[in-house]
Amino acid sequence: MLLTGEVQLPPLVLRLLCLEPAGGADALFEASWEGQRVRFVAECKSNSSARAVAAAVDQIRRRAAQYDALPMVIVPYLSPDQLDTLAQQKLSGVDLCGNGTLAVPGRLFVYRTGRPNIYPDSAPIKNIYRGQSAFVGRAFLSHPLFSAVTAVRKEIELRGATISLPTVSKTLKGLEEDLIIAREHGGPRLLQPEKLLDQLTKNYCPIPPRQRCLIKGPAEESAWAPLLKRLAQQENCTLVMTGAATGMRLAVAGRDPVTPFYCACPPAKIISASEGQLLETDRFANVELCWTAEPTAFFDVRERDGLPVASPVQAYLEMARGEQRLQQLSEQLRKIVIAEATQGRGVME
């Protein structure tokens, strides 16, 4: 594509001057527009991952001076985030799909995006921020350093989820490619907690309950809370306050009159076991049971004020993807999550 002139960034015209010039670079280019001409030296990568782009940037920055040219990277696809990063660094990058950014400090700036990735095989990594793979990222937000891959799996299992060792290994590889973790002699270590949290938020899917049931229990939480907890344990039914409800408490915000919980069994089972102490009704209800089998709901359950509550990560994800009122409060939860990821211990443990 370089030889046939297919790599372009309109309205600029890119002209290949030399392929594989002496000195180790991959190509020399000339960019022209309305009589202006600028030389670029390029490093090409067949992989579009964040790690590959960062490596290309590092290599071409060190080599650019010997060519008396500005640095450029060329990869199969540049995402909007990657283009933004290059633009912020005043670096140039072009992909094979028609996206790119070109910077000549003080003279010229071009930014072109919106073309889809037509080379998906250039980054053959599944979505590591959704489904079972997301447990790996969540584990790092509570425990930023591990001794080995097996330690990551053990941590996930201790926090209530099951995952295979191959899935953990593949996810770690993807996180490393995205520059979110680094593998060092001491084991995998979290580098960018905020970027990891942003990716988990972007890919978070709300938990769809099989059934919702409004319940009226004793008027005071000090009475219904231990009752609900005891009944759930008695019926061997996993119970946890929803992330949004947990977040309202962690953010020290006004509480809703009804406190929602996820439960792993039909609500009728708990209501029946209460022998009349809990009634299914929408009149003056103070508890809601949401029946779900989604493992995400019960991952990393903590305890607060005698009740099983969601982790700060789950609380943040539900609030950040919730209604406007919750989104406004979510920033308080974000600070808690990042602090836990930095300190490496659970804030409610």
Image (spheres, grey):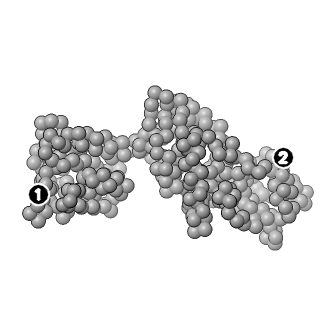
x, y percent for residue 339:
57, 47
Q: Residue furthest bottom?
A: 283
The amino acid type of the residue labelled 2 equals Gln
Q: Quadrant of residue 165?
A: top right
At 54% from the left and 43% from the top, the residue drawn is 342
Residue 15 seen in the figure: yes
Q: Which residue is mark 1?
A: 37
Which one is in front, 300 or 335?
335
Q: Answer whether labels 1 and 2 touch (C-beta < 8 Å).
A: no
Residue 199: image tag: none
Image position of 73 (left or right of 341): left
At 39% from the left and 44% from the top, the residue drawn is 124
Q: Residue furthest right?
A: 275
Residue 323 seen in the figure: no
x, y percent for residue 138:
56, 45
Residue 234: image tag: 2
The amino acid type of the residue labelled 1 equals Arg
Compared to residue 186, the image places residue 118 above or below, namely below
Which one is in front, 181 or 305?
305
Circle nearer the N terminus (1, 2)? 1
Graded by Cα atoms within 10 Å as few (under 14), some (14 to 19) or many (20 or more), the crowding at tag 1 reads: few
